[in-house]
């Protein structure tokens, strides 16, 4: 009897998990059948407080830096696990990852594009393909 092991590298599991959580954050009501994507509170607050100094803006900026750093850490794990290119710019990876999520929400909410999820996954898959070793 022959056994074939199926192996998915940890870095890809991490990237896919973080991506799935991000998409679910934006898309959750559609998945439950309401037909409407919810607004990401962080994106809404970013627009509202980007030019308003103070504790709310400071806390929001910290949360977004933490999010960026989390995504970059996923990319750096991929580099250290030799699943992503050793010359991968983790901050650029995070920029594109987060940017895909932001445009995904715009396509869902503002443009009501039912192909938004597929487009977002296509963009994410392209980001992973460019990042792979």
Image (spheres, rainbow, N blue to C red):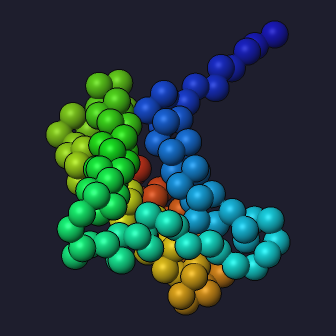
User: The C terminus appears in which quarter of the rendering?
Assistant: top left
Nearest the eye: 12 or 46: 46
Which residue occupies the foreground of this view, 99 or 48? Answer: 48
Q: Is residue 1 left or right of residue 85?
A: right
Residue at the front extreme of this rendering: 54
Q: Position of residue 16 (x, y in %)?
A: 53, 44
**Image coords of residue 124 (percent x, y):** 45, 58
Q: Residue at x 32, y 53 (%)?
A: 59
Give the residue displayed 32% in from the left and 36% down from the top.
Answer: 73
In the rendered view, tell whether residue 15 sits above or below residue 19.
Answer: above
The residue positioned 29% from the left and 63% from the top of the image is: 57
Q: Quadrant of residue 7?
A: top right
The answer to whether residue 132 shows anywhere in this view is no
Q: Can the viewer see residue 23?
A: yes
Of the pair 113 and 49, the residue shown nearer to us? 49
Image location of residue 18, percent across then percent down: 51, 45
How many numbered callouts? 0
Quarter where residue 115 is shown: bottom right
Quadrant (top left, top right, bottom left, bottom right) of the N terminus: top right
* Residue depicted at x 56% and y 42%: 17
Asked if residue 71 lies left or right of residue 110, the reply is: left
* Residue 112 higher or lower than 83, as above or below: below
The residue most toward the bottom is 111
Height in image: 56 above or below 39? above
Q: In which image quadrant can residue 70 be found?
A: top left
- Residue nearest the observer in this picture, 129 or 109: 109
Residue 27 place in picture, x, y as percent: 64, 66
């Amino acid at each position: 009897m022959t056994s074939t092991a199926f192996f998915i590298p940890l870095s890809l599991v991490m990237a896919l998990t973080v991506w799935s959580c991000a998409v679910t954050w934006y898309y959750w009501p559609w998945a439950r059948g309401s037909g409407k994507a919810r607004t990401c509170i962080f994106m809404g607050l970013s627009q509202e407080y980007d030019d308003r100094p103070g504790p709310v803006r400071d806390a929001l900026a910290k949360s977004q830096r933490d999010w960026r750093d989390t995504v970059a850490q996923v990319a750096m794990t991929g580099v250290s696990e030799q699943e992503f290119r050793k010359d991968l710019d983790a901050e650029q990876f995070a920029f594109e990852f987060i940017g895909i999520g932001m445009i995904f929400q715009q396509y869902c909410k503002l443009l009501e594009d039912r192909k938004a999820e597929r487009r977002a996954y296509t963009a994410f898959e392209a980001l992973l393909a460019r990042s792979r070793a």
